[in-house]
Image: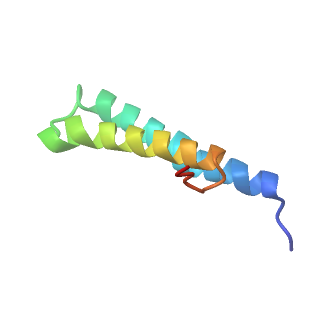
Amino acid sequence: MKVSIQKLWVADLIINVVLPILAGAIIYYAANYFELNKYVRNQLPDGLWAWALFSCTLIIWDRRIHLL
């Protein structure tokens, strides 16, 4: 069974961009209602959002880092 490139690209975008952004937003909102560790409350969402930005950039560049 062959999977089209379009479906793989969409799945990659959802897993590596949309889910980390949503997870970071949920952690930020959960910090208002639950007692969370300082690291989890502050640095983890920022790291997830940075991962999403870097993954989105790599997806656009076809997973290749162009140095020159």
Based on the displayed image, in which of its 4 quarters is residue 56 positioned?
top right
Give whichever of 30, 53 is nearer the camera.
53
Q: Position of residue 17 (x, y in %)?
A: 53, 43
Q: Quadrant of the N terminus?
A: bottom right
Q: Residue at x 64, y 44 (%)?
A: 60
Above or below: residue 60 compared with residue 30: below
> What residue occupies the far bottom of the structure in this picture?
1
Q: Residue at x 23, y 31 (%)?
A: 31
32 displayed left or right of 25: left
Based on the displayed image, in which of its 4 quarters is residue 50 positioned?
top left
Q: Residue at x 52, y 52 (%)?
A: 67
Q: Position of residue 29 (x, y in %)?
A: 32, 27
Q: Residue at x 21, y 43 (%)?
A: 40
23 displayed left or right of 9: left
> What residue occupies the far front of the structure in this picture?
68
Residue 37 in view of the camera = no
Q: How is the image coloured?
A: rainbow
6 displayed left or right of 47: right
Q: Position of residue 9 (x, y in %)?
A: 71, 51
Above or below: residue 10 compared with residue 32: below
